[in-house]
Amino acid sequence: MIGWNLIVQRNEGAALTGGWRKVAVVGGGPAGLFLARLIRMARPAVSVDVYERNAPDEASGFGVVFSARTMSELRRNDPETHARIVAASVAVSDMELRHPRATLRYGGFDFSSISRRALLLILREQAAKAGATLHFGKLVAPGSLDDADVVVYADGANSSHRDVDPERFGTSVRHGSSPYMWLGTHAPFDAATFAFVETEHGHFAGHAYPYADGMTTVVVETDPGTWKASGMDRAGDFSRNPGGSDEEALAQLGEIFAEHLGGHPLIGNRSRWSTFRTVHNERWSEGNAVLLGDAAHTAHFTVGSGTKMAMEDAISLAAALQRNTDPGPAFAEYERERRGPVARTQEWAEPSMRWWETFGRRLHMAPAQFGLHFMTRTSALSYEGLRRRFPDRVDEAEAAYRTSGGAAGAAPAAAAVDLRPNAVTEPLLLGSVRLRNRLVEVLPEDCGDREAAVRAAEARGAALVLARQRPGLSLGLPVPPHPEPAAR
């Protein structure tokens, strides 16, 4: 993708209008504000209006995170805004796992975190500086902006404009099972910290990461059974304070995580229990309307992707509009460019969400084993990748596995590749089927020659191959120990 700064330089001084002159953006979050700035930077003759239902000082939330790769994209496309975000951010490189019986540290995961309020202030000022017109406290009715050449729905996962007709974009929303709540604290943390606490009612987990001097975001998550048993399913009385937080839950959670908070209380900001909504849309545009950010897609917060995907969407859509005089082809180009990265992020997020929904089932494990499960919960980091980066941590997990009696005792069967003896190479009994190791591969839906694909998986050492078939997952194909036709 051509850097936006290069596009601006190439067109500096030109009054480019093309076939569209008026843009209306619904939603003054990161995606909508950044898009407004990028469009105005490249096409000063185009009018851009952003409509946000909240007042400028009503920003909710605490901190948001950006990976090093996303920050590089921001710098490449808008150096000035990137510099302001960096100046207001906190750099974090370590992850700390606080198991009830031990603490594990993993380094080298560089990312930046910033106050959501500070980020929105920067993006508002930058959008206005570029010439966008910002309307705050302005709730616009669906259909009222249709006279614009381009209408951008950037009003979040619960987009009211998108949901007027879910069939229009083929919208589907799936709710996760675990209740969670966004909070903050003044407790000091120097790493992205994941604390797991056992209580008489069940298990709670806290995700904590610093985002400003003296401020840390805390996301608390639990399973439905623990949530109900602890009495936190009983919503507080919000009749006198509709925009308030669940203060009873805040106090109770403060006690549960007291050891990790060092005596600091939890802070709410419209903080209430919720379940995560995974949003999919079959189409991201229709007519002169296009979806952006969470209105188009969401991925579970445990992969830190929401604001990242929104900002990257804005870069892609703005560049596509710059290259096309007709919004229709621009929308199609934007969707083609972003579908792949979004799908990959959602594929990582899905197993991460399931892992967090069931983390309590693994707390009985030795801390090192639990850490291995946690770090490899998505395909973003494989077992071998973890071994390359943290060999000592993997050795600890292997030792704990064998000490606990997990090893079968017998030497694993020889594989087609050289796999060092470890828990992954141990045989596994699935019903009446004995697999020679625990390596599993999943064939893509568009796999042509499945026989050849199974043989290739065997060459890589896999003992089980799963073939995806809509609507679900087909039966596995055990890989035989010798080059015979694959079992069907």
Image (spheres, grey):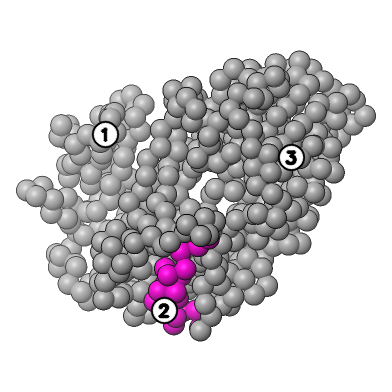
Amino acid type for the residue under numbered disc 1: Gly
- Which residue is located at x 36 percent, y 68 percent? 204
Q: What residue type is labelled 2?
A: Glu
Relative to 107, does residue 2 appear above or below in the rendering? above
Residue 5 lies left or right of residue 444; in this view the side is right
Q: Residue 255 carries which label?
A: 2
Which residue in the protein does label 3 denote?
135
Q: How far across and how far down the image is residue 96, in percent?
A: 48, 72
The location of residue 470, given as percent across then percent down, is 29, 28
| Residue bounds of the magenta highlight | 244-262
Between the residue at mark 2 and the residue at mark 3, the CA separation in whole angstroms equals: 42 Å
The answer to which of marks 1 and 2 sits earlier in the sequence is 2
- Residue at (69% x, 49% y) in the render: 55
Depicted 70 relative to depicted 199: above or below: above
440 in magenta: no
Residue 11 as seen in the image, left or right of residue 385:
right
Q: Name the residue under label 1.
A: 472
Q: Does the magenta stretch include residue 259?
A: yes
Q: In which quarter of the image is residue 391?
A: bottom left
